[in-house]
Image: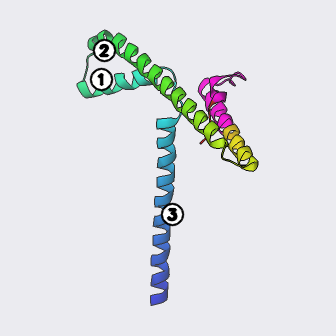
C-alpha cells in the first residue's frame, strides 16, 4: 500500500467519523428540543414523577397508591405553570414584535408577519399532533408569535 492511498483512507475514515458525529449532534439536538419545548400530553409530568419516584425510592404498590393523588395534583399544577409560562412568553414576544415593527421598513414588516405566520402554522401542527384533531381557528396556538 503506497503512502497516497494510506492518506486517502485516513481522510475517508476521518470524514465518515465527522459526518457521524454531526449527525448524532443534529439528532440529539432535535430530540432535546422536542422534549423540552414541544408539547407534552396531559399527565406527562405526573407520570414522569411517578416513574422516577418508584424507580429511585423503590416504592411498593401500596405506597404508590397512597402518594398518587399528591403526584397527580402536583403534575396538574406543573402543567398549569408550564401553560402560564408559555402564554407569558408568547405575550412578551408579541409585545416585542409590536415595538420593533415601528422601526422596520414596510418590506421588513411583511417579513416579520410571514415569520409569525410560519410560527402559527408550526404551532398548529404541534397542536394537531398532540390532539390528533386540527385546532379551532381562534385557538391559543394561533395567537403565538414567531422568533
Residue at 50%, 36% in the rendered image: 37
- Asked if 12 appears above or below 24 in the picture, the reply is below
> Which quarter shows the C terminus?
top right
Location of the N terminus (image quadrant)? bottom left
At 51% from the left and 38% from the top, the residue drawn is 34
Which residue carries the number 1 mark?
54
Residue 4 is situated, as x and y percent measured from the top left of the image, at: 48, 88
Q: Quadrant of residue 46?
A: top left
Residue 140 falls in image quadrant: top right
Badge count: 3
Residue at mark 3:
19
Task: Depth check: give the residue in front, 103 or 139.
Answer: 103
Q: Residue sitting at 61 percent across and 23 percent down?
A: 131
Q: Is residue 46 left or right of residue 135?
A: left
Q: Earlier in the sequence, mark 3 or mark 2?
A: 3
- Does the magenta segment cover residue 141? yes
Which of marks 2 and 1 precedes in the sequence? 1
Is disc 2 surrounded by few (<14), some (14 to 19) or many (20+) residues within 10 Å? some
As drawn, the residue found furthest toward the left would be: 57
Magenta segment includes 146: no
Point 30% across, 9% down: residue: 66
Instruction: Give the magenta-colored segment's residue range.
Output: 119-143
Residue in the foreground of this view, choosing between 135 and 7: 135
Mark on residue 117? none
Q: How is the image coloured?
A: rainbow
Q: CA separation, marks 1 and 3?
A: 40 Å
Along the viewing direction, whichever of 137 and 66 lies nearer the viewer: 137
Look at mark 2 in the image and give the residue it sits on. Answer: 64
Amino acid at each position: 500500500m503506497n503512502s497516497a492511498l494510506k492518506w486517502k483512507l485516513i481522510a475517508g475514515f476521518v470524514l465518515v467519523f465527522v459526518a457521524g458525529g454531526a449527525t448524532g449532534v443534529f439528532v440529539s439536538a432535535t430530540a432535546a428540543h422536542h422534549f423540552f419545548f414541544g408539547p407534552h400530553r396531559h399527565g406527562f409530568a405526573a407520570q414522569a414523577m411517578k416513574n422516577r419516584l418508584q424507580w429511585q425510592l423503590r416504592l411498593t404498590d401500596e405506597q404508590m397508591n397512597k402518594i398518587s393523588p399528591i403526584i397527580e395534583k402536583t403534575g396538574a399544577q406543573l402543567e398549569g405553570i408550564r401553560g402560564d409560562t408559555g402564554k407569558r412568553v408568547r405575550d412578551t414576544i408579541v409585545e416585542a414584535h409590536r415595538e420593533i415593527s415601528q422601526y422596520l421598513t414596510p418590506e421588513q414588516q411583511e417579513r416579520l408577519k410571514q415569520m409569525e405566520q410560519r410560527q402559527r402554522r408550526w404551532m398548529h401542527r404541534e397542536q394537531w399532533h398532540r390532539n390528533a384533531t386540527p385546532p379551532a381557528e381562534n385557538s391559543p396556538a394561533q395567537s403565538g408569535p414567531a422568533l
